[in-house]
Image: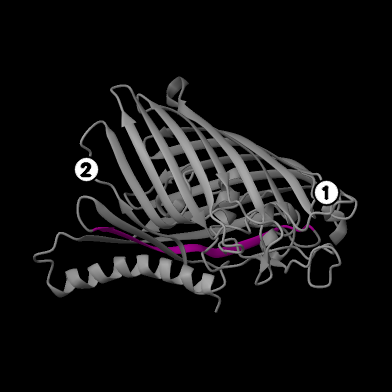
Amino acid sequence: MRLNKIASLLAIGGAALLVGVPAVAQYSDGGQGSDIKVDVELFTDFRVAVADGEPTWLDDWLGKGRFGGNLQGDTVTDIEVAEIAALFDVNFNWEWSAFVHAKFDEIQDGPVDFVEAYLKYAPAPTSRTRYSFRAGLFFPHISRENVGVAWTSPYTITPSAINSWIGEEIRTLGLEAKASVRRETFQLDFTAAVFGFNDPAGTLLAFRGWALNDVKGGAFSQLPLAPLPQIGADSTFVKQPLWVEPVAEIDNRVGFYGAVDWTYNRNWKLGAFYYDNRADPEAIDREQYGWDTRFWNFYAEGDVVSDIHLIAQYMTGNTRMGEFRPMAGTRYIDMDFESAFVLATKKFGDHRLSARFDWFETTDHAFVRRDNNNEAGIALTGAYVVELGRKSTLMAEYLYIDSKRTARRDIGFAPDQSQSIFQVAYRHRF
């Protein structure tokens, strides 16, 4: 096993041990003489889906949803366990805590994988400025939708294209610092982090494009790629295996991100986020390439007329990979990506209605005749949610996706594809 894989195992395993050991200690002494508090929650998500159109990308294709039709475009019905997660919250004292999200689903490679595992230090404030620190494996503070338990959305089953990609490929193993300045009517948050183990981020965006699904890539899991002729072991262009391992260290270089968030009257929120993994685009290790990926993310949200809550998010960035070719003046991959969405949601007691519009696009600047990664598309989402109790939720969602991706011709499909996906999810927490 490579040293970087051992390092990641130790870092993630260490956080899990720090969660598990106190729980055993608390049990062994009956909870006497210890201030450690351990909360363990089991989260389950059972799913029924009916989808038409092209096959899902999870079946090694170029479909845009978690579910899809078959190769003939027929409607397919799926019943599956979308996720079973164990969530550990540990409070060692007033300042130190830890969190671990371990999961099982039908997508990941092994029976158990980690989504997040980190330690947090939040010292008691001595002024209106508060500080906190995280170390371990975690999602950067990007998504405005995935604010529910187990990094789920309370608004829809399927997050936007932006936050679907965050769930798939963006996971950092590093150290994050945050400062919050509070005043009577507003709060300013400043966040900065250094990280590693996210060098392949951008692979899915380039070779598959945007997608809309609630897949959360595990720390040690691989995500599939379609058998395009321009990639693969027999390709003369990019010998990329037909999978990507997003949480991997390729070049031993440190990446960083930073964010500024502004909250007014606890209702209106604005934020800007910048990410740069600083990956070496010519590095390769264990069949995985470094992808030099950087992006900006902006958001705004707040309550408007009749208590309708609006969330808007916009992302723009670039990813590059491969040896620089002087004759062409570019690398194998040089692609801009861009997406935006607007979501409106309203609660009626235990019921919630949500609607969202997505737009997404990629622009390829390199070797387009040989490897065309251009695409453009839109998606419409409508969802109904009802709380059946304090720990049970029933969700129904309709998702329509229409996109054009030239690379579909390379696997025998028309570039223009559309599909409808209807899902029902029953989520329960124990």
Question: Residue 359 placed where, x, y %?
Answer: 68, 37
Q: Any magenta on residue 281?
A: no
Asked if 7 appears above or below 74 in the picture, the reply is below
The amino acid sitting under disc 1 is: Ala
Query: Residue 185's image quarter?
Result: top left
Residue 209 shows in the view: no
Residue 313 shows in the view: yes
Marks 2 and 1 sit apart, C-alpha to C-alpha, by: 52 Å
Question: Residue 6 placed where, x, y %?
Answer: 49, 74
Disc 1 is placed on an element classified as loop
> Badge 2: few (under 14), some or many (20 or more) residues near its Cα, within 10 Å?
few
What's the mark number on residue 330? none
Disc 2 is placed on an element classified as loop
Residue at image mark 2: 124
The amino acid sitting under disc 2 is: Ala
Asked if 20 appears above or below 147 in the picture, the reply is below
Asked if 18 appears above or below 297 in the picture, the reply is below
Q: Which residues are magenta?
A: 73-91
* Quarter that holds the C terminus: bottom left
Judged left or right of residue 365, residue 357 is left
Judged left or right of residue 356, residue 289 is right
- Give 188 or 265, whichever is nearer the viewer: 188
Residue at image mark 1: 366
Q: How is the image coloured?
A: one colour
Q: Main secondary structure of the magenta part?
A: strand
